Image: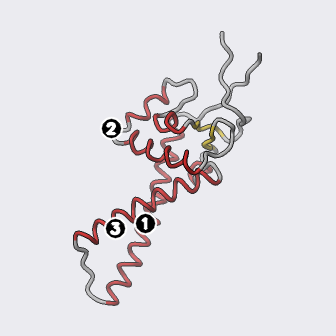
Amino acid sequence: MSTTRVHYAGIATRALALAVDVAIVQVIVFTCAAVIGLVGSLVGDLHLDTLGRVLAAVAWALAVATYFVTFWSTVGQTPAMRMMDIRVVAADGTPPSLGRSIVRLVGLGLAIIPFFAGFLPVLVDDRRRGIHDMLAATVVEHEGSPGGPFLSAPAP
């Protein structure tokens, strides 16, 4: 049986895409916060108490989650992933489902928390998957890859 090697995205490409995506979503969040702050200052004195700060943090988390989950589950790539010509796919070669994208996002948080140690498997895994990819059963491949089911190199 002949198999084709799929060109999976490496750690540098994925790291750059993640950094650009984080910058994009932060600009969006900060712009919205600035507009809300401006409107609030026009209406009256705006001071956030503890509840307001918690709500702001929840709004930030929801914005980040919505950004990644929406792009992954609809087109399989975020704007930065498109810039880097990479995409995330499920085992059948299609963009991950909404549920799979949520699992991937939670896994991404778990991969980042211990000093990005959850990305170390990308260096040794045959499909260059991080912890978040393993949890969600996804891979990140270059856009020009043939797609379809996960393929691996032929056995020696």
Locate the C terminus and report the quarter of the image it occupies. top right
* Chain-order first, disc 3 or disc 2: 3
Q: Measured from the top left, where is residue 119 in percent x and y?
A: 44, 34
Residue hosting label 3:
56
Question: As shown in the figure, which amino acid type bears the numbered disc 3?
Answer: Ala
Crowd tier of the residue under label 1, counting other residues whose Cα lies within 10 Å: few below 14, some 14–19, many 20 or above: some
Q: Real-space Cα distance between discs 3 and 2? A: 25 Å
* Chain-order first, disc 1 or disc 2: 1
Position above or below: 57 against 68: below
Q: Real-space Cα distance between discs 1 and 3? A: 10 Å
Crowd tier of the residue under label 2, counting other residues whose Cα lies within 10 Å: few below 14, some 14–19, many 20 or above: few
Q: Residue furthest bottom?
A: 43
The numbered disc on residue 29 is: 1
Question: As shown in the figure, which amino acid type bears the numbered disc 2?
Answer: Pro
Residue 142 location, quadrant: top right
Residue hosting label 2:
114
Q: Real-space Cα distance between discs 1 and 2? A: 25 Å
Question: As shown in the figure, which amino acid type bears the numbered disc 1?
Answer: Val
Position above or below: 111 against 5: below
Q: Measured from the top left, where is residue 108 in percent x and y?
A: 44, 43
Q: Relative to residue 58, is residue 131 drawn left or right?
A: right
